Image: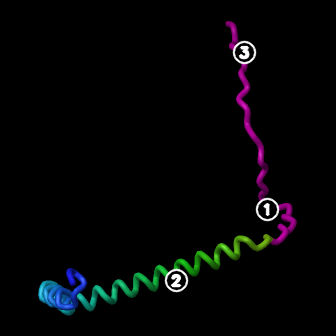
Amino acid sequence: MGIFDWKHWVVILVVVVLVFGTKKLKGLGTDVGESIKGFRKAMNDDDKGAEADSAPAPAPAATPLNQPTTIDVQAHKVEQPAHKE
């Protein structure tokens, strides 16, 4: 028997209802349900995003001359000799 006896669960349920009240328990149930729905939606959105990321990207179009372009370079510090005065 032990903790899995149905009589124990009924007593625990009655105590919880007396302590928290039915309005708070209903609100808690609604909040938990909305949280689960939001989590599922986020997981589905992540799955769709991962599928979209794995698709090949289209080739970039030629940039017009008036648009800025990015140049990828690496800067090096140049040591200059000290001036003797």
Residue at disc 3, secondary structure: loop
Check whether the beta carbons of the residues at disc 3 and disc 1 lie within 8 A of each other: no
**Label 3 neighbourhood size at 10 Å, few (<14), some (14-19), many (20+)?**
few
Residue at the image position 77 percent from the left and 48 percent from the top: 72
Labelled disc at residue 41: 2
**Residue on which the image places disc 1:** 67
Q: Residue at x 38, y 87 (%)?
A: 33
Question: Would residue 72 appear left or right of 21 to someone viewing this image?
Answer: right
Instruction: Point out residue 43 in the picture as x, y percentages from the top left corner.
Output: 54, 78
The C terminus lies in which quarter of the figure?
top right
Question: Label 2: how many residues lie within 10 Å, few (<14), some (14-19) or many (20+)?
Answer: few
Q: In this view, does 10 lie above or below 45?
A: below
- 79 and 51: which is toward the camera: 51
Q: Is residue 31 above or below residue 55?
A: below
- The disc placed on residue 10 is none
- Predominant secondary structure, magenta span: loop
